[in-house]
Amino acid sequence: MDEIYNQQRFSKIKGMVAQFADYLQGLYRRGIVCKLDFQALSEFVNSLVLLRATEFIIGESYGIPPEQSAMHFARQYAPFFVRLLQPRLPAE
């Protein structure tokens, strides 16, 4: 039973990672983000979100509203992702 549950759970996680990688690839094709390893970035984002989701749940048990936790996450990581994904101008 555990093996079947784990296979289903991990296949869903792999599907989410692949879907986000495809989304980033689409942004790249439109010239919105730079070219990089979208699969690795998607795995990193997925791990980061799962870690932060755990913190949101723990924070909620201490009375911290989820919106406050989400805004803290956004303030902390938004500049990083903007710099990481920003298209680079060719060197002159």
Image (cartoon, rainbow, N blue to C red):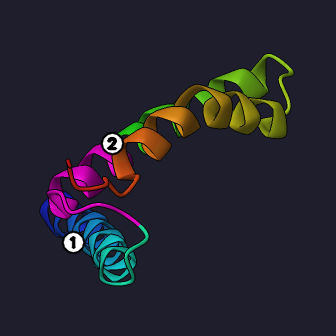
Give whichever of 26, 4 is nearer the camera: 26
**Amino acid type at image mark 2:** Ser
SS state under label 2? helix
Would you say residue 67 is visible in this rendering? yes
Residue 74 included in the magenta stretch of the image: no
* Residue 22 located left or right of residue 68: left
> x and y percent of residue 34 in the render?
29, 60
**Amino acid type at image mark 1:** Ser
What is the magenta segment's predominant secondary structure?
helix
Q: CA distance from mark 1 to mark 2?
A: 15 Å
Q: Quadrant of residue 10?
A: bottom left
SS state under label 1? helix
Residue at the location (75% across, 35% down)? 71
The residue carrying mark 1 is 11
The residue carrying mark 2 is 47
Residue 45 included in the magenta stretch of the image: yes
